[in-house]
Image (cartoon, helix red, strand yellow):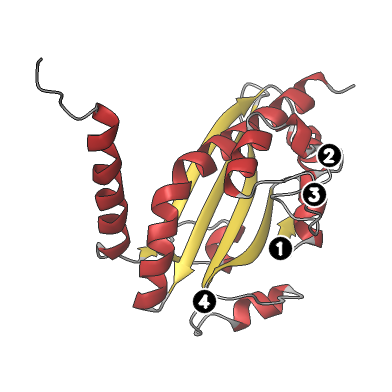
Amino acid sequence: MGRRTPGIGMVLLPAGVVLACAGAWWPVGVQQATGDTLLDELLPESHFGEVHTTRVRAAPERIFRAVHAVTADEIRYFRVLTWIRSPRLPWRRGTESVLAPDWHAPILDVALRSGFVLLGEVPETELVVGTVVCCGTVALGSADGFQALETLDYARAAMSVRVEALPDGASLLTTETRVAARAPSVRRRFGLYWSFIYPGSALIRRGWLEAIRRRAETAP
């Protein structure tokens, strides 16, 4: 009989763990904002981030109505990805959160009821929300509470949705997430977490933009 060799999964799994750990310990530089957006003003320095965009055939005011109206149920892959992150078992009844939302309520409202705070809004242009993603549970309460944690050992995340009118009558819709973690120990802990969740996070952000686009382009 021939000698059996390890399956490719047995090789890739340890490699993935090593890469994730390396990502957590790899030095993370500070990203300094250079623009003049509301997000730049509210969180000018960050250590992790992601940006996604899509083109929408609608005016900014119509898009922002969709931003406030889109539900979790409209976001592609949201159910499966959040279940992987936080399984919703039939016999477990937890509190509402973005990982366990009311599927038919606007997802923005769910977020603001469950740990996120509104950091600022420019009508029909940009909206920014914030929360703490590491390391510890904090009741923010307000935008001032978010800013008060700047020098403490927490990782703060700010997420914006921004709309820019284009010359042809369409609009550019952008969502950007930034995470700031001043303490090296917090950066390492969040870096390990980020290594694992980033692919799913990116899919959810893209799905959110798609849901906003569909609603903005088809709503009466």
Q: CA distance from mark 2 to mark 1?
A: 17 Å
Residue under label 1: 116
Q: Mark 4 and mark 1 in contact? Answer it, CB < 8 Å.
A: no
Upstream in the sequence, badge 3 or badge 2? 2
- Amino acid type shown at disc 1: Phe
Quadrant location, the N terminus: top left
Looking at the rendered image, the disc whose residue lies closer to the viewer, 1 or 3, is 3
Residue under label 4: 154
- Residue 134 left/right relative to 219: left
Looking at the rendered image, the disc whose residue lies closer to the viewer, 3 or 2, is 3
Residue under label 3: 91
Residue under label 2: 69
Q: CA distance from mark 1 to mark 3?
A: 27 Å
- Circle 3: element type: loop
Seen at 51% across and 40% down, the residue is: 200
- Residue 153 left/right relative to 146: left
- Circle 4: element type: loop
Task: Determine whether 32 is above or below 55 in the image.
Answer: below
Q: CA distance from mark 4 to mark 3?
A: 33 Å
Residue 215 visible: yes
**Of 218 and 3, which appears nearest the observer?**
3
Neighbor class of circle 3 (other Cα within 10 Å; few <14, some 14-19, many 20+) is few
- Amino acid type shown at disc 4: Tyr
**Residue 127: image x %, image y %?**
70, 53
Quadrant location, the C terminus: top right
